Amino acid sequence: MLLGQYDYSIDPKGRLNFPAKFREDMGDSFIVTRWLDDCLVAFPKEEFQQMAQLLMSKGITKNRDVQRFLFAAATEVEPDKQGRILLPAKLREHAGLDKEVTIIGNMNHAEIWNTQAWNQRQEAMDTESIAQAIDALDF
Amino acid sequence: MLLGQYDYSIDPKGRLNFPAKFREDMGDSFIVTRWLDDCLVAFPKEEFQQMAQLLMSKGITKNRDVQRFLFAAATEVEPDKQGRILLPAKLREHAGLDKEVTIIGNMNHAEIWNTQAWNQRQEAMDTESIAQAIDALDF
DNA sequence: TGAAAACTACCCACTTTTACCCACATCTAA
DNA sequence: TTAGATGTGGGTAAAAGTGGGTAGTTTTCA
């Protein structure tokens, strides 16, 4: 269960720390790729493979742009002994990652945000509609 | 059944006592996250997982902001031998927790308030509309 | 093709934060 | 009154986060 928000900064060597609490769930190496709302997503390898398989099972020519979106940008990363990962420049560009980075847990995957973009996103959230959505769960 | 109000203060190390009477219901470790009206909520792990599953079952990209609201702020806490929990700074900020804290029981979950905010909330309650809501239960 | 530059993967060192332990005062119930 | 539970404070070791050195590899460009 990936939960919580963690703020890090990319160091001069381009390394980005990855939350220690996530490492067990994410495994030794995991997949990072583009995601919606201009952030990146990190999936445990198994989850990513499962999603990929589902997508491909719909047909290799179906959802071509979805395949391209997800797979062309994807990269497998393996944290170093200190738990840091190195993201390809392309991916950093996609999410506008330069210095301040926020990593958030989202149950079965993590999202990697430019901290400023994340803060703006949070501030723009409408609590009333969130309350409605929670009620709609019928929990 | 979580009931009652308990006042504690956060110690210099950031630790917050959690009501002994709640511990059995909450289990060995439980989930604390943001909630509405600028307080925090504590759910037993099972309850939280159930809610999370409901939310995720609607689709991993559906309700993205609701997921982020709940999961990015969430943290699993495990009381120490004395029954205290350590809340991440972000969560403390969300609820304006600095020193005086009030924890209240709410049947299947607990709420964590800045004591002053809680008192104000109580004073601002409109007994007439509460009476109406109770009547509307047709109990 | 070959040398310089850039990149990467390992190291190690240091600071900060967290987890774990023990002590003790206060409260509660038999 | 006393034993056990509860709440508060603090010490210390381990974990997490950050910075940097260096050697080996790849890339770049003349």
Image (cartoon, coloured by chain):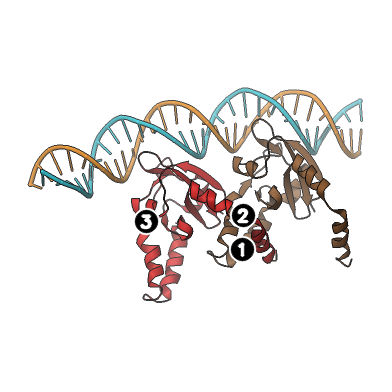
Chain colours: A red, B brown, C orange, D cyan
As drawn, B11 above or below A52: above
**What is the spatial separation of the Cα atoms under label 2 and label 3, in whole angstroms?**
28 Å
Q: Is residue A8 left or right of residue A138?
A: left
Q: Is residue A112 left or right of residue B92?
A: left
Can residue A106 be seen in the rendering of this structure? yes
Q: Estimate the x, y position of residue A97 in percent, counting from the top left.
A: 42, 48
Contact between marks 1 and 2 (CB within 8 A): the answer is yes
Residue type at the position of mark 1: Leu
Q: Which element carries disc 2, helix, strand or loop?
A: helix
Q: Are marks 2 and 3 on the same chain?
A: no
Name the one closer to the observer, A47 or A91. Answer: A91
**What is the spatial separation of the Cα atoms under label 3 and label 1, in whole angstroms?**
28 Å
According to the picture, the residue beneath numbered tag 3 turns out to be A75
According to the picture, the residue beneath numbered tag 1 turns out to be B55
Report the disc number at residue B70.
2
Q: Estimate the x, y position of residue B77 in percent, counting from the top left.
A: 64, 45
